[in-house]
Image: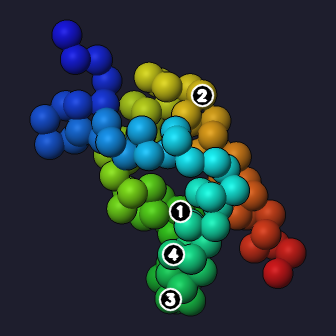
Amino acid sequence: MVRGPCRGNRCDFWARIKIRKKSITELVEEAQVVIIPCQDQESMNLRTALDEYWKESGISDMYILCLEEPDLCEKIASVEAKIKYSNLHS
């Protein structure tokens, strides 16, 4: 009966709700606060920092999220695109 986000230890139901409720601008601002310091580490590139950010936000499996909720996946992609753009121009 339970579709998608709750799969035992891999439940990301609440993370999806939080992301859905926030605007793209809010998500970009929150992510940049976390991601910019991470990039200062030699072992952390932007892709790794973004992946880590979503994981820490509660998303357990981005691939499954994108299969189940393409609109939410598009929102996350928009957030990442804005972050990448701002990093290129800073």
Badge nearest the viewer, 3 or 4:
4
User: Residue 28 in the image: x percent, y percent?
Assistant: 64, 61
Residue 8 picture quarter? top left
Left or right? Give the position of 35 relative to 60. right
Q: Which residue is mark 2?
A: 71
Q: Which residue sits furthest left?
A: 8
| Pointer 1 local density, CA inside 10 Å: few below 14, some 14–19, many at least 20 | many
User: Residue 14 in the image: x percent, y percent?
Assistant: 32, 42
Q: CA distance from mark 3 to mark 4?
A: 12 Å
Amino acid type of the residue tagged 4 in the rendering: Val
Amino acid type of the residue tagged 3 in the rendering: Gln
Q: CA distance from mark 3 to mark 1?
A: 14 Å
| Pointer 4 local density, CA inside 10 Å: few below 14, some 14–19, many at least 20 | some
Element assignment for label 1? helix
Element assignment for label 4? helix
Labels 3 and 4: the sequence-earlier one: 4
Q: Which residue is mark 1?
A: 50
Q: Is residue 48 above or below residue 11?
A: below
Residue 41 is marked as 3
Q: CA distance from mark 3 to mark 2?
A: 32 Å
Residue at position x 56%, y 77% in the image: 33
User: Residue 45 in the image: x percent, y percent?
Assistant: 57, 74
Residue 34 is marked as 4
Residue at position x 44%, y 46% in the image: 18
| Pointer 3 local density, CA inside 10 Å: few below 14, some 14–19, many at least 20 | few
Residue nearer the viewer, 16 or 62: 16
Element assignment for label 2? helix
